[in-house]
Amino acid sequence: MNQDRGHQEAEYHRPVLAEVVVELMAPVLPGVVVDATFGGGGHTRRMLDEFGEEVTVIAMDRDPEALANARGLRATVIEANFADIDTAVAAVTDEPISGVLFDFGVSSHQLDEAARGFSYRREGPLDMRMGPDATLSAAEIVNEWPADEIARILREYGEEPLARRLARAIVAARPIDSTATLSTVIADAMPAARRRAGHPARRTFQAIRIAVNAELEAVAAGVTRAVDLVRTGGRVVAISYHSLEDRIVKQEFNARARGCTCPPDLPVCACGNTAEVRVLTRKPVRAGAEEIAINNRARSAVLRAVEKVAS
Ligand SMILES: C[S@@+](CC[C@H](N)C(=O)[O-])C[C@H]1O[C@@H](n2cnc3c(N)ncnc32)[C@H](O)[C@@H]1O
């Protein structure tokens, strides 16, 4: 194994905020925990090491390549989109579910594998599908979508200030046949000042990836269904990597914690809704400097957690 590969593999298995995850899951055990984003299996391994027989893990991922990492682990494997977490879990167990963990986004393995087309730093096909269930590919967006639609996703999913300009540049450069060509098209369309502030194609690649995989729809459905799925006293823990994901998690957790939806000026509650969860992270948890120093991915991680108090 050369040094670079060794480094990549270490990154691949280094789970973000693992100590916090273990601390949050400990009180719900013994029981079944769904690792809804198995990836390199870092969090699952950490939980199996910490809790042993106390934890039964269901390892879920939409990427069959990720699930190959579960070989030899004491875990039930499900290839599924976590948007369907309730039905996918019901198909393998009728045990109550004590915990669900989400660690959103792409894995280091997916990013490092040029053939998957996720990386703006590597030559690869315009693919970006996390799994075979994705119905779009990056090539379709880049080479077939109208400029207005491309501009919309760059704005909404990439928070890209130059969305219109970049969308026009993409359309003018068609056909675009690889990630490297797309990166160059974006870099050439950027003003010099932006070229100095991080990789110019980062936001564009993020936006296309989110659209290809319908990531935000999956986060919304997954978090809602996970809260429905866990037993009373069970916990849902979610680690987000950008504000779009985190906003969805925060809103869902807060809405389920609020219960009553009556207007504040109503003297008595008329809706009858009661709080379903208790928020365990008043302030979202972030990685400390030490963890960030050894794991760059931890830099943008934001963890939120809830405990189910009623069904
Ligand atoms: C950041 S990685 C998880 C890393 C893992 N926690 C570890 O410690 O090795 C995210 C994983 O979630 C998967 N994923 C992303 N969105 C998904 C979805 N909607 N349904 C199922 N899996 C998804 C990706 O395929 C990827 O393998």
Image (spheres, grey):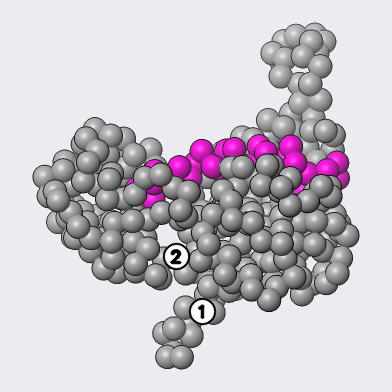
Q: Quick check: is the Cβ at mark 2 less than 8 Å away from ligand 1?
A: yes
Magenta span of residues: 206-235
Q: Note whether residue 275 is visible.
A: yes
Per the rendering, the mark at residue 101 is none
Proximity of marks 1 and 2: CB atoms separated by less than 8 Å: no
Per the rendering, the mark at residue 110 is 2
Q: Quick check: is the Cβ at mark 1 less than 8 Å away from ligand 1?
A: no
Horizontally, residue 258 falls left or right of residue 180, namely right
Q: How many marks?
A: 2
Q: Please, what is the dominant secondary structure of the magenta stretch?
A: helix
The C terminus, quarter of image: top right
- Judged from this view, the residue extending furthest toward the left is 172
Q: Secondary structure at mark 2?
A: helix
- Amino acid type at circle 1 is Glu
Reading the chain from its start, which is encountered first: label 1 or label 2?
1
Horizontally, residue 35 falls left or right of residue 213, namely right
Closer to us: 30 or 203: 30
Image coordinates for residue 113, horizontal then vertical, percent: 39, 70
Per the rendering, the mark at residue 9 is 1
Q: Is residue 183 within the magenta segment?
A: no
Q: Note whether residue 281 is visible.
A: no
Closer to us: 133 or 309: 133
Horizontally, residue 83 falls left or right of residue 215, namely right
Residue found 68% across the figure and 76% down from its top: 72
Residue found 85% across the figure and 57% down from its top: 31
In the image, is residue 311 above or below residue 17?
above
